[in-house]
Image: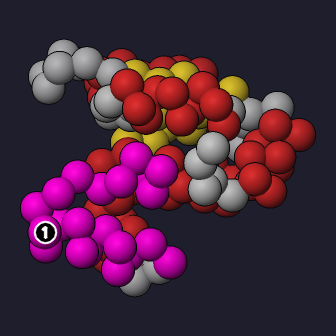
Amino acid sequence: MSNIDKNSIKILKERGVQIKFFVGLPGSGKEEVCSKLEKEYGFTYFNIEVLIENEVQSNNTFSSQIKKCLDDHVEVADELQLSILIRYLVNSQKKYFLVANFPKTLNQALIIEEEL
């Protein structure tokens, strides 16, 4: 069982949030596709890498943990990445989302499957 905020998960489920994840090799066009879908169909588009960068710049809840990972040259923990994503989803107040560059690992996919 993960340490993801269960109340936030409950909020997303009650709101009927739908999330589509886009993964692929660098340069495969996933961000271009997400941008087009966002414009044409009103999805809200997030790129997990941008969310992590924003978190570091904002000095929010998770920024010190992310900075430590970056300083140590290690990947930001799977559950931390998902926690950041979930917080953005909850705060957006929207229902339909596209997320690029996540999940990147089998473990991340399993956490998503378990939690969402």
Percent from the top left, x then y, of residue 76? Answer: 30, 56
Question: From this viewpoint, is residue 37 visible?
Answer: yes
Asked if residue 110 is positioned above or below residue 88 in the image, the reply reads above
Label 1 CA crowd tier, 10 Å (few <14, some 14–19, many 20+): few
Give the residues in magenta: 61-81
Determine the residue positioned at 54% across, 55% down: 83
Percent from the top left, x then y, of residue 86? Answer: 60, 50
Q: Secondary structure at mark 1?
A: loop
User: In the image, is 71 to the left or to the right of 19?
Assistant: left
User: In the image, is 85 to the left or to the right of 70?
Assistant: right
The part of the image, by quadrant, that contains residue 18 is top right
Asked if residue 97 is positioned above or below residue 52 in the image, the reply reads above
Is 9 within the magenta?
no
Determine the residue positioned at 13% across, 22% down: 27
Which of the pair 59/79 is nearer the observer? 79
What residue did someone put label 1 on? 72
Asked if residue 66 is positioned above or below residue 108 in the image, the reply reads below
- Of all residues, the one furthest to the right in this rendering is 14
Percent from the top left, x then y, of residue 100? Answer: 38, 32
Is 74 within the magenta?
yes
Q: Amino acid at mark 1?
A: Asp
Q: Main secondary structure of the magenta part?
A: helix
- Of all residues, the one furthest to the front in this rendering is 1
Q: Where's the N terminus, which quadrant?
A: top right
Determine the residue positioned at 69% across, 58% down: 5
Q: Where's the C terminus, which quadrant?
A: top right
Percent from the top left, x then y, of residue 13? Answer: 81, 37
User: In the image, is 73 to the left or to the right of 78?
Assistant: left
Determine the residue positioned at 10% across, 61% down: 73
